[in-house]
Protein backbone atom coordinates (compact mmCIF):
# COMPACT_ATOMS: atom_id res chain seq x y z
CA UNK A 1 0.00 0.00 0.00
CA UNK A 2 1.49 3.36 -1.04
CA UNK A 3 2.39 5.65 1.81
CA UNK A 4 2.09 9.41 2.12
CA UNK A 5 0.22 9.95 -1.12
CA UNK A 6 -1.39 13.22 -0.07
CA UNK A 7 -4.81 11.95 -1.12
CA UNK A 8 -7.50 12.74 1.46
CA UNK A 9 -10.82 10.95 1.09
CA UNK A 10 -14.16 11.13 2.84
CA UNK A 11 -16.16 14.03 4.15
CA UNK A 12 -14.87 14.03 7.74
CA UNK A 13 -11.23 13.70 6.72
CA UNK A 14 -11.43 16.46 4.10
CA UNK A 15 -13.37 18.77 6.42
CA UNK A 16 -10.80 18.39 9.19
CA UNK A 17 -7.94 18.90 6.76
CA UNK A 18 -9.37 22.31 5.86
CA UNK A 19 -10.04 23.16 9.51
CA UNK A 20 -6.49 22.20 10.46
CA UNK A 21 -5.11 24.56 7.84
CA UNK A 22 -3.58 21.95 5.53
CA UNK A 23 -2.77 23.24 2.08
CA UNK A 24 -5.19 21.61 -0.34
CA UNK A 25 -4.02 21.87 -3.94
CA UNK A 26 -7.28 20.78 -5.52
CA UNK A 27 -10.67 19.50 -4.42
CA UNK A 28 -12.44 16.86 -6.52
CA UNK A 29 -16.20 16.75 -6.03
CA UNK A 30 -18.84 14.46 -7.48
CA UNK A 31 -20.59 16.46 -10.18
CA UNK A 32 -24.13 17.36 -9.17
CA UNK A 33 -23.69 16.45 -5.49
CA UNK A 34 -25.56 18.93 -3.28
CA UNK A 35 -25.40 17.15 0.07
CA UNK A 36 -25.00 19.49 3.03
CA UNK A 37 -21.55 18.28 4.17
CA UNK A 38 -20.17 18.47 0.63
CA UNK A 39 -21.57 21.98 0.17
CA UNK A 40 -19.83 22.99 3.43
CA UNK A 41 -16.54 21.58 2.14
CA UNK A 42 -16.96 23.47 -1.14
CA UNK A 43 -17.56 26.74 0.73
CA UNK A 44 -14.40 26.17 2.78
CA UNK A 45 -12.44 25.41 -0.40
CA UNK A 46 -13.67 28.62 -2.01
CA UNK A 47 -12.80 30.60 1.12
CA UNK A 48 -9.23 29.27 1.02
CA UNK A 49 -8.84 29.72 -2.72
CA UNK A 50 -8.65 25.99 -3.45
CA UNK A 51 -9.44 24.94 -7.01
CA UNK A 52 -12.58 22.78 -7.27
CA UNK A 53 -12.94 20.24 -10.07
CA UNK A 54 -16.25 18.49 -10.67
CA UNK A 55 -15.84 14.91 -11.83
CA UNK A 56 -17.86 11.75 -12.42
CA UNK A 57 -18.20 8.95 -9.91
CA UNK A 58 -16.07 6.75 -12.17
CA UNK A 59 -13.25 9.32 -12.00
CA UNK A 60 -13.48 9.49 -8.19
CA UNK A 61 -13.48 5.71 -8.02
CA UNK A 62 -10.30 5.64 -10.11
CA UNK A 63 -8.59 8.17 -7.85
CA UNK A 64 -9.74 6.58 -4.62
CA UNK A 65 -7.31 4.49 -2.60
CA UNK A 66 -9.85 3.49 0.04
CA UNK A 67 -12.95 2.81 -2.05
CA UNK A 68 -14.91 5.08 0.29
CA UNK A 69 -14.50 8.62 -1.01
CA UNK A 70 -18.09 9.73 -0.21
CA UNK A 71 -18.11 11.99 -3.26
CA UNK A 72 -15.12 14.12 -2.30
CA UNK A 73 -11.34 13.78 -2.60
CA UNK A 74 -8.72 16.38 -1.77
CA UNK A 75 -5.23 16.45 -3.22
CA UNK A 76 -2.73 17.84 -0.72
CA UNK A 77 0.92 17.71 0.13
CA UNK A 78 1.90 14.34 1.57
CA UNK A 79 1.59 13.84 5.32
CA UNK A 80 4.86 14.58 7.07
CA UNK A 81 6.13 12.54 9.97
CA UNK A 82 6.95 14.36 13.17
CA UNK A 83 10.04 13.92 15.28
CA UNK A 84 9.75 12.39 18.75
CA UNK A 85 11.01 15.72 20.06
CA UNK A 86 8.01 17.43 18.42
CA UNK A 87 5.66 15.26 20.48
CA UNK A 88 7.42 16.16 23.72
CA UNK A 89 7.40 19.83 22.75
CA UNK A 90 3.65 19.66 22.17
CA UNK A 91 3.20 18.45 25.75
CA UNK A 92 5.41 21.29 27.03
CA UNK A 93 3.51 23.86 24.98
CA UNK A 94 0.26 22.68 26.58
CA UNK A 95 1.78 22.59 30.04
CA UNK A 96 0.97 18.90 30.40
CA UNK A 97 2.88 15.79 31.33
CA UNK A 98 3.66 13.77 28.19
CA UNK A 99 1.19 11.11 27.13
CA UNK A 100 2.36 9.10 24.12
CA UNK A 101 1.09 5.97 22.34
CA UNK A 102 3.70 3.60 20.91
CA UNK A 103 2.49 0.98 18.44
CA UNK A 104 4.41 -2.27 18.02
CA UNK A 105 3.76 -3.90 14.65
CA UNK A 106 0.29 -2.59 13.79
CA UNK A 107 -0.19 -3.61 10.14
CA UNK A 108 -3.89 -2.87 9.61
CA UNK A 109 -4.34 0.72 8.37
CA UNK A 110 -7.86 0.87 9.81
CA UNK A 111 -6.47 0.01 13.25
CA UNK A 112 -3.76 2.65 12.96
CA UNK A 113 -6.25 5.30 11.87
CA UNK A 114 -8.65 4.40 14.68
CA UNK A 115 -5.84 4.54 17.25
CA UNK A 116 -4.74 7.98 16.02
CA UNK A 117 -8.36 9.13 16.36
CA UNK A 118 -8.54 7.76 19.90
CA UNK A 119 -5.17 9.30 20.78
CA UNK A 120 -6.45 12.69 19.71
CA UNK A 121 -9.68 12.42 21.70
CA UNK A 122 -7.86 11.13 24.79
CA UNK A 123 -5.49 14.08 24.75
CA UNK A 124 -2.35 12.12 23.86
CA UNK A 125 0.41 14.32 22.51
CA UNK A 126 1.44 11.96 19.73
CA UNK A 127 1.83 8.47 18.33
CA UNK A 128 5.08 6.63 17.61
CA UNK A 129 5.29 3.79 15.08
CA UNK A 130 8.21 1.62 13.96
CA UNK A 131 9.78 1.95 10.54
CA UNK A 132 9.61 -1.76 9.70
CA UNK A 133 6.88 -4.42 9.83
CA UNK A 134 4.13 -1.89 10.39
CA UNK A 135 1.77 0.22 8.32
CA UNK A 136 2.66 3.85 7.68
CA UNK A 137 0.53 6.89 6.90
CA UNK A 138 -1.69 6.01 3.96
CA UNK A 139 -4.94 7.40 2.60
CA UNK A 140 -6.79 4.61 4.41
CA UNK A 141 -5.15 5.57 7.70
CA UNK A 142 -6.05 9.20 7.15
CA UNK A 143 -9.69 8.36 6.45
CA UNK A 144 -9.95 5.98 9.40
CA UNK A 145 -8.57 8.69 11.68
CA UNK A 146 -11.55 10.90 10.72
CA UNK A 147 -9.25 13.90 10.40
CA UNK A 148 -7.32 13.35 13.65
CA UNK A 149 -4.14 12.85 11.63
CA UNK A 150 -4.18 16.59 10.95
CA UNK A 151 -3.84 17.33 14.67
CA UNK A 152 -1.98 14.40 16.26
CA UNK A 153 1.71 14.11 15.33
CA UNK A 154 2.97 10.69 14.26
CA UNK A 155 6.68 9.88 14.50
CA UNK A 156 8.36 6.94 12.80
CA UNK A 157 11.41 5.41 14.49
CA UNK A 158 13.91 2.73 13.55
CA UNK A 159 13.97 0.98 16.93
CA UNK A 160 11.00 1.13 19.29
CA UNK A 161 12.92 -0.32 22.23
CA UNK A 162 15.69 2.24 21.88
CA UNK A 163 13.12 5.02 21.63
CA UNK A 164 11.58 3.85 24.90
CA UNK A 165 14.99 4.00 26.58
CA UNK A 166 15.54 7.52 25.28
CA UNK A 167 12.11 8.67 26.45
CA UNK A 168 12.78 7.26 29.90
CA UNK A 169 15.57 9.83 30.17
CA UNK A 170 12.86 12.47 29.70
CA UNK A 171 10.98 11.05 32.68
CA UNK A 172 8.39 8.86 30.97
CA UNK A 173 7.18 5.57 32.42
CA UNK A 174 5.94 2.85 30.09
CA UNK A 175 3.02 0.47 30.32
CA UNK A 176 2.17 -2.14 27.71
CA UNK A 177 -0.99 -4.11 27.10
CA UNK A 178 -0.51 -7.75 28.05
CA UNK A 179 -3.00 -10.48 28.90
CA UNK A 180 -0.72 -11.72 31.66
CA UNK A 181 -0.25 -8.30 33.24
CA UNK A 182 -1.69 -6.59 36.30
CA UNK A 183 -5.36 -5.52 36.02
CA UNK A 184 -5.24 -1.95 34.76
CA UNK A 185 -7.33 -0.60 37.64
CA UNK A 186 -4.60 -1.65 40.08
CA UNK A 187 -1.83 0.29 38.31
CA UNK A 188 -0.79 3.88 38.88
CA UNK A 189 -0.96 5.32 35.36
CA UNK A 190 -0.56 8.98 36.29
CA UNK A 191 2.35 11.18 35.35
CA UNK A 192 4.38 11.24 32.11
CA UNK A 193 3.52 7.98 30.39
CA UNK A 194 3.90 5.96 27.23
CA UNK A 195 1.23 3.39 26.38
CA UNK A 196 2.51 0.51 24.23
CA UNK A 197 0.02 -1.43 22.10
CA UNK A 198 0.98 -4.54 20.14
CA UNK A 199 -0.36 -6.10 17.00
CA UNK A 200 -3.60 -8.01 17.14
CA UNK A 201 -2.82 -11.66 17.77
CA UNK A 202 0.89 -11.24 18.47
CA UNK A 203 0.71 -8.54 21.11
CA UNK A 204 3.74 -6.52 22.18
CA UNK A 205 7.02 -8.17 21.18
CA UNK A 206 9.19 -9.61 23.94
CA UNK A 207 12.06 -7.16 23.43
CA UNK A 208 9.73 -4.15 23.63
CA UNK A 209 7.74 -5.60 26.53
CA UNK A 210 10.96 -6.03 28.54
CA UNK A 211 11.64 -2.31 28.17
CA UNK A 212 8.31 -1.42 29.79
CA UNK A 213 7.94 -0.65 33.49
CA UNK A 214 4.46 -2.17 33.82
CA UNK A 215 2.16 -4.54 31.98
CA UNK A 216 -1.56 -3.87 32.04
CA UNK A 217 -4.30 -6.43 31.66
CA UNK A 218 -7.74 -5.41 30.48
CA UNK A 219 -10.28 -7.37 32.56
CA UNK A 220 -12.47 -9.42 30.21
CA UNK A 221 -15.58 -11.38 31.10
CA UNK A 222 -16.56 -12.82 27.74
CA UNK A 223 -15.92 -16.10 25.98
CA UNK A 224 -13.02 -14.96 23.79
CA UNK A 225 -9.65 -13.83 25.07
CA UNK A 226 -8.60 -10.95 22.83
CA UNK A 227 -9.59 -7.48 21.68
CA UNK A 228 -9.05 -5.55 18.49
CA UNK A 229 -5.84 -3.50 18.85
CA UNK A 230 -7.62 -0.18 18.44
CA UNK A 231 -10.25 -1.15 21.02
CA UNK A 232 -7.56 -2.18 23.51
CA UNK A 233 -5.78 1.11 22.90
CA UNK A 234 -9.00 3.02 23.56
CA UNK A 235 -9.76 1.20 26.81
CA UNK A 236 -6.27 1.69 28.22
CA UNK A 237 -5.96 5.27 26.97
CA UNK A 238 -9.15 6.22 28.75
CA UNK A 239 -8.06 4.49 31.95
CA UNK A 240 -5.07 6.84 31.80
CA UNK A 241 -7.46 9.75 31.21
CA UNK A 242 -9.62 8.66 34.14
CA UNK A 243 -6.67 8.51 36.49
CA UNK A 244 -5.36 11.88 35.29
CA UNK A 245 -8.73 13.48 35.97
CA UNK A 246 -9.23 11.78 39.36
Image (spheres, rainbow, N blue to C red):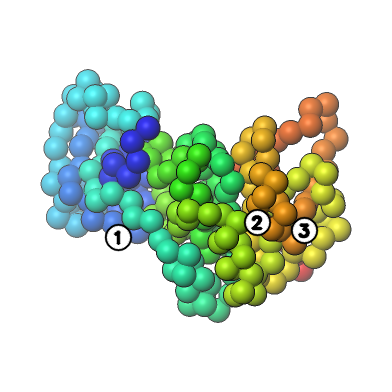
Write down the residue under mark 3: 214
Residue 73 percent coordinates (x, y)? 27, 37
Write down the residue under mark 1: 21
Residue 71 percent coordinates (x, y)? 29, 31
Relative height, residue 43 to residue 53 (above, below): below
Residue 224 percent coordinates (x, y)? 79, 27
Find out whether the residues at labels 3 and 2 contact each other: C-beta distance under 8 Å. no
Q: Residue at x 61, y 39 (%)?
A: 199
Neighbours of disc 2 within 10 Å: few (<14), some (14-19), many (20+): many
Q: Quadrant of residue 82?
A: bottom left
Neighbours of disc 3 within 10 Å: few (<14), some (14-19), many (20+): many
Query: Is residue 151 visible to the viewer in this orientation of the structure?
Result: yes
**Observer-nearest of 214 and 158:** 158
Q: Quadrant of residue 1?
A: top left
Q: Quadrant of residue 74?
A: top left
Relative height, residue 65 to residue 173 (above, below): above
Q: Quadrant of the C terminus?
A: bottom right
Amino acid sequence: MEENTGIIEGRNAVTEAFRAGRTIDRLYVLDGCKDGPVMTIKREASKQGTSIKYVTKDRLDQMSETGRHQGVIAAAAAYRYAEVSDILQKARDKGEEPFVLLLDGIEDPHNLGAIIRTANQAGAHGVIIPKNRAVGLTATVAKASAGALNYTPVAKVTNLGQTIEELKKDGLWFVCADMGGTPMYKLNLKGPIGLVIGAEGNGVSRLVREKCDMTAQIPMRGDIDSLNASVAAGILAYEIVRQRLA
